[in-house]
Image (tube, grey):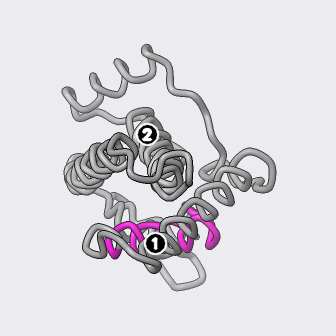
Amino acid sequence: MSMSETKPQALIWTAFVRITHWLVALFVLVNFFNESGFWHRLIGYFCLVLVFARISYGLWLTKAASSKFYMPTIANMKHHLNEIRTRIFAPHIGHNPLGQLAVYLIWALIVALAITGWLSRTDAYWGEDWPVDLHLVLSNALQGLVILHIAAVVLMSKLQKKNLLKQMISCKSSDTTR
């Protein structure tokens, strides 16, 4: 097959999705190790802006099917778990149902972290322990979800024989079955 006859590879994630994904990932990682202070707050608020930008993009601004949002149902999630068990996968445009749910949970935690971080600095809650304690619990939950996300990407890449990480780096499909 000549170069002109090769099958074009499909666009998986838009540049906006990839850039916001990696910026949020970088800033969350930096804030895990930079536990307080001006830069921690600035980075946290910037993450919040990126999450709202990504939500706006997915709801109203994009035409790319992979970047749009959907609400996974219990039936969708059960079906996907059965796909994992049988290792027979229907194609997904964008996230599978469990991945989509994880995205929503990660974003909700980032929003909640920004709110609890801000509350802990307000006059009304200055000196109160609960906003800081809740912030720590939410941070630990986010760390757990990030670890689960990475493990799921590795597992699903292996099961589907697709390099899902490459799809978040490159605009082109990495389906190894082509």
Q: What element carries label 2?
A: helix
Q: Is residue 100 above or below residue 142?
A: above
Q: In this view, does 19 lie to the left or right of 74?
A: right
Q: Nearer the viewer, mark 1 or mark 2?
A: 2
Q: What element carries label 1?
A: helix
- Mark 2: few, some, or many residues within 10 Å (few <14, many ≥20)? some
Q: In this view, does 115 lie above or below 37?
A: above
Residue 86 placed where, x, y %?
21, 27
Tell me the residue that label 2 is attached to. 105
The residue lying toward the viewer, choosing from 9 and 57, is: 57
Residue occupying the far top of the picture = 75
The residue drawn where x is 38% and y is 71% is 166
Q: In this view, does 119 lie above or below 91?
A: below
The amino acid at mark 1 is Trp
Between marks 1 and 2, how big is the CA–CA gap? 17 Å
- Mark 1: few, some, or many residues within 10 Å (few <14, many ≥20)? few
Look at the image and give the residue range highlighted in magenta. 11-30
Residue 151 lies within the magenta run: no
Tell me the residue that label 1 is attached to. 22
Chain-order first, disc 1 or disc 2: 1
The residue lying toward the viewer, choosing from 166 and 103, is: 103
The residue drawn where x is 72% and y is 56% is 57
Quadrant containing the C terminus in the rendered view:
bottom left
The residue drawn where x is 32% and y is 58% is 162
Residue 1 placed where, x, y %?
46, 78
Residue occupying the far right of the picture = 60
Cβ atoms at labels 1 and 2 below 8 Å apart: no
